[in-house]
Amino acid sequence: MRVAVVEDDEGVADALVDALTANWMTAVHLRRGQEVLVRHHELDIVLLDLGLPDLDGIEVLRRLRQVSVLPVLVLTARDDERPVVRGLHNGADDYLVKPARMSELLARIDTVGRRAALQGSTAQATTRTFGDLVIDVGSRSLTVAGDRVRLTTMEFDLLAAPVENPGAAVSRQQLMDRLWGDAFVAVSRSLDVHMAALRSKLGRPGSIETIRGFGYRWIG
């Protein structure tokens, strides 16, 4: 797996690169957000610090999501949750607060890798239509009223889960297991943020019904 550590702190970056390399990953240190935008096609996942010398990390996310669904894990030292929530809204797949526990970071990277591999091996040319919503599972695309809607990897996975069996309830536990590979390493708040972003992009918030105290259901 090719991992970019986008971090301007040399000490933090060196520690992460060494740890990732020791775990059989190909790690590269990028110091500027612009480098990510130029080299994203060479990578499998990005560990992105929000405080960069050339571009704010949120702006890097916005620009990256215009051209790629490359998985992004935000690394932040900020204890204010607002920039983290903004990052998730703008396409980050997950986040960790620095200094991150290496075991947890490796677990989340592994989860993203396994999910991407599974998507590549099991994608089917299945199209599901609900009124003016068209969901193509094979191409992982969403069309609303004839317009293509760009979803992050996490958002599409979150959409696909209840759509597989319309009307059936899907628990939060099941969704977190599916999106993160293990609900133990998932962050419940992250699920809420991704769901809010998905509903906003759908423009049909009532299509995904909340089952209080349990999870969600697709009602189309």
Image (cartoon, rainbow, N blue to C red):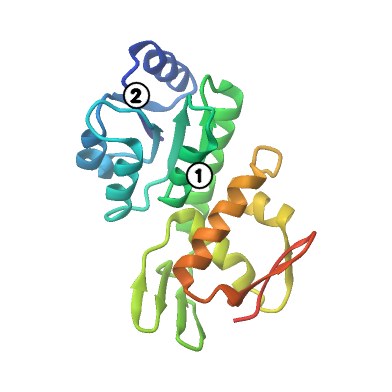
- In what quadrant of the picture does the N terminus appear? top left
Q: Position of residue 3 (x, y in %)?
A: 38, 32
Where 215 falls versus 31 (above or below)?
A: below
Q: Residue 161's quadrant in the figure?
A: bottom right
How many angstroms separate mark 2 from mark 1 (CA)? 20 Å
| Residue 2 vs residue 93, the one in the foreground | 93
Residue, disc 2: 7
| SS of the residue under disc 1 | helix
User: Disc 1 residue type?
Assistant: Val
Q: Position of residue 168 (x, y in %)?
A: 73, 74
User: Disc 2 residue type?
Assistant: Glu
Q: Earlier in the sequence, mark 2 or mark 1?
A: 2
Does residue 19 appear to the left or right of 171 in the view shown?
left
Q: Position of residue 50 (x, y in %)?
A: 38, 32
Q: Is residue 101 visible?
A: yes
Q: Are marks 2 and 1 in contact (CB under 8 Å)?
A: no
| Residue 41 vs residue 78, the one in the foreground | 78
Where 167 falls versus 156 (above or below)?
A: below
Identify the residue at the far top of this view: 11
Where 63 falls versus 162 (above or below)?
A: above
Q: Which residue is at a point 31% across and 52% down the rendered structure image? A: 68
Identify the residue at the far right of this view: 213
Q: Which residue is at a point 51% across and 63% down the rendered structure image? A: 198
Residue, disc 1: 85
Q: Is residue 137 visible?
A: no
Does residue 111 appear to the left or right of 6 in the view shown?
right
Q: Which residue is at a point 30% across and 43% down the rendered structure image? A: 59
| Residue 65 vs residue 17, the one in the foreground | 65
Tally of numbered discs: 2
